[in-house]
Amino acid sequence: MAIRVEHAMPASLTGPEPIRTSDIEALNALFSNAFTERYRRDGLVGVRVPPLNPVIWQYAIQGAGSGAMLWRDATGAIAAFNIAHASGAEGWMGPLAVRDDCQGSGWGKRIVRSGVEHLRVSGCRTIGLETMPRTVDNIGFYSGLGFIPGHLTVTLTLDAGGSPAVPGLLSLVNGAARVDALAACAALTAAVVPGADYTREIRLTHDLSLGDTLLHYRNQELAGFALCHAAPLVEARARDELRVLKLVAADQDAFEAMLPGLSGLARRSATTRVALRMQGEHRNAYAAVVRHGGRVRWTDLRMTLDGYPQIVATQGVALTNWEI
């Protein structure tokens, strides 16, 4: 999620510089304080946004590479950050925030523009972010930078259930067979959403033991996959849900066939539910999740930079998180 927390001219910030693992604790504190303040300004005074699980930050930082950027004040403390991700030609930013005392003097715009420039140089054809749809000043801020609102992203959850013995999992595949499975995932992604590539995210998820990738085969051909995280999103909390970060299905039938497998993987992962972030353009897929018992939990507004629209699925279903 991208938020803007803007106010008086601070001392000049320095950056951008790369985010290191050693920055995670300070980064987490800024994240928690900035997003809590955003909720307070929206009238939700009792909401306290907790720090994220450090391994989730590690996933985001490693996945973004040189797109993970921060800025420091004169004391060396972190004053702002932006994590810009490039999944092939699909680029998005989040989370990003500016410390409350460093707002109102244009730093928010500079941080966003730095992320945009990084994604442009990386060859992204999509440059976007997600923000809270009720926060009109956020929407106005990003609109002033050339971002245009698109569909809502609606998070729905399905209860865990079925058998925990899910046969089509990347964790059960080794050696040359795993290399072939990753190549098949990349080929399917290229066919459904030309230009996007989620291979790095899949590898990082398994390297950091964050979750698993459900593989759905039809007639011995890969017809769909879903990259899922079971690790708790929030620091020091028990795992509660399986989060689908990327899902690609060759067609609607393949998508619906994957839903029981996702519920089974949630059970296997010792979580109570599976969460899917449904982009509004996938009307039939959304309706299918609701038919399977999906419940609406949250909404985000997707915005893309003018001239850099979201890559549209040419066939099938492609769900992609613009959140960590």
Image (tube, helix red, strand yellow):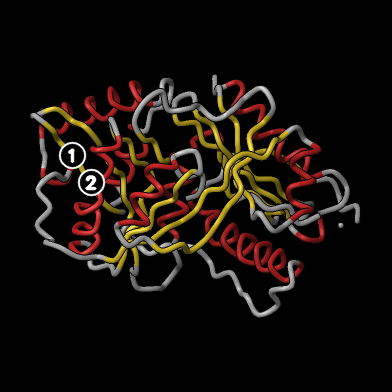
Q: Secondary structure at mark 2?
A: helix
**Which residue type does callout 1 highlight?**
His
Q: Position of residue 199 (x, y in %)?
A: 33, 32
Total count of labels: 2
Q: Amino acid at mark 2?
A: Met
Say which residue appears at 39% left-offset and 36% top-offset: 318
Q: Nearer the viewer, residue 46 or 9?
A: 46
Q: Residue at x 11, y 40 (%)?
A: 173
Label 1 crowd (10 A; few <14 / some 14-19 / many >=20): many
Q: In the image, residue 234 lies at what x, y percent?
A: 45, 66
Q: Tell me whether the residue at label 1 lies in contact with that at label 2, contact meaning CB atoms closer than 8 angstroms.
A: yes
Q: Which residue is mark 2?
A: 258
Up/down of 121 relative to 271, above or below: above
Extreme bottom residue here? 46
Q: Nearer the viewer, residue 316 or 14?
A: 316
Q: Is residue 156 above or below residue 169?
A: below
Up-down: is 251 above or below 204? above
Q: Which quadrant of the structure image shows residue 40?
A: bottom right
Q: 317 or 309: which is nearer to us?
A: 317
Mark 1 → mark 2, Cα distance in angstroms: 7 Å
Please report the residue visible at 34 percent of the width from the left and 73 percent of the height from the top: 238
Q: Position of residue 319 (x, y in %)?
A: 41, 40
Residue 127 at x, y percent in the picture: 60, 31
Residue with the mark numbered 1: 216
Q: Residue at x 70, y 39 (%)?
A: 112
Q: Secondary structure at mark 1?
A: strand
Q: Earlier in the sequence, mark 1 or mark 2?
A: 1
